[in-house]
Image: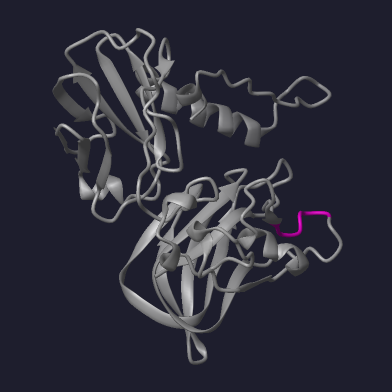
Amino acid sequence: MVSTRDSNLLMNISPKGDGSIYKTQLAVLDEVGNWLSDYGDAVYGTRAGPYLPGPWGGATRKGNKVFLHILQNSRDGKLTLPALPYLLKSSRLLNGGSVTVNQTDNSLEIDMDDAVASDKTIPVRIVELTVDEDTTADMPAISARVEGPPNSEWKKWYKKEKYISSNKRKNDDDFRGYLLVSATAKTNSEEAGKVVDDNDRTAWGALEPGDKGYTGEVEWLQLDLGSDKTVTHFYLKEEFSRIRKYVVQYKSGDSWIDITRGKRLNILSYKLDAPVKARYFRVQFLETAPNENGQRMAPHIESFHLYN
């Protein structure tokens, strides 16, 4: 996403004393290199825009191409953005599968292959748009306000009655109707409230290997809505990209019922198959990336929000 902001990313590694590199760091570098070998055309030699980045993703451009970097998982594969200032000639989904893009006077409507759109193992879906003009000229940025479960910078555009899991009250009209919620966790529970504090600069993190009390057992993070509430969407945002397997659940009686399971988390905006009415919701972190000693690193979560 750095390239969608006209920036560069400098990656640093910390070699061992003998100059060799830890296997976990090599694995990350290999993963980045493999991704760039497939999708580097959407990064190298590009400029940011024309769309401003947001939780939905961002855009880059070069020549007569615009690349949409779409982060959010979507049940139906649909995304609507403001119209481009160019004539659209063709489109394709670089991840494979099909995509249909229609441009009207006011909007650009993207409909991706369902399998690709909902695949949680794909960190970003890239749609290549070919247009009729050179896109590299300076132009005003287009604000892309996309409706859906947002993070803190996005939710001001979301309908106030849909956001039900915040522990902060707001005075302006955009935030009236927020309901109080409490958050707990298996470890570092006193920090769990940071996932509902409306601040993306704070995060809950479980105990790390070496911390007092660390056991290596499966970690979880739980929201208590105070009473049964109907939930249709949830939104999760991870810090550090460590999670490799997870499950999101709600409590029914004494049992926990699965909503969805996945591998990579990063940013997940998820629409439930059917509304669920419950008081307790949680995410379990079944597997995280190992450190250089083979121990599972702690999950870190910035946001966990529920919507109706």
Q: Residue at x 23, y 31 (%)?
A: 83
* Residue 264 seen in the figure: no
Q: Residue at x 60, y 72 (%)?
A: 222
Q: Residue at x 63, y 20 (%)?
A: 10
Picture coordinates of residue 142, whole percent (x, y): 36, 28
Picture coordinates of residue 226, whole percent (x, y): 58, 83
User: Which is more toward the observer, 166 or 178?
Assistant: 178
Picture coordinates of residue 183, whole percent (x, y): 65, 71
Residue segment shown in magenta: 205-210
Q: Residue furthest front?
A: 172
What coloring was used for the rendering?
A: one colour
| Residue 229 against residue 66 in the figure, above or below | below
Q: Is residue 51 left or right of residue 304?
A: left
Q: Residue at x 40, y 23 (%)?
A: 141
Q: Is residue 207 left or right of residue 73?
A: right
User: Which is more toward the observer, 181 or 283?
Assistant: 181
Picture coordinates of residue 81, whole percent (x, y): 28, 37
Q: Residue furthest bottom?
A: 253
Tally of numbered tags? 0
| Residue 99 against residue 209 in the figure, above or below | above
Q: Is residue 114 left or right of residue 136?
A: left
* Residue 178 seen in the figure: yes
| Residue 66 against residue 246 in the figure, above or below | above
Quadrant (top left, top right, bottom left, bottom right) of the C terminus: bottom left
Q: Quadrant of residue 4?
A: top left
| Residue 136 against residue 110 in the figure, above or below | above
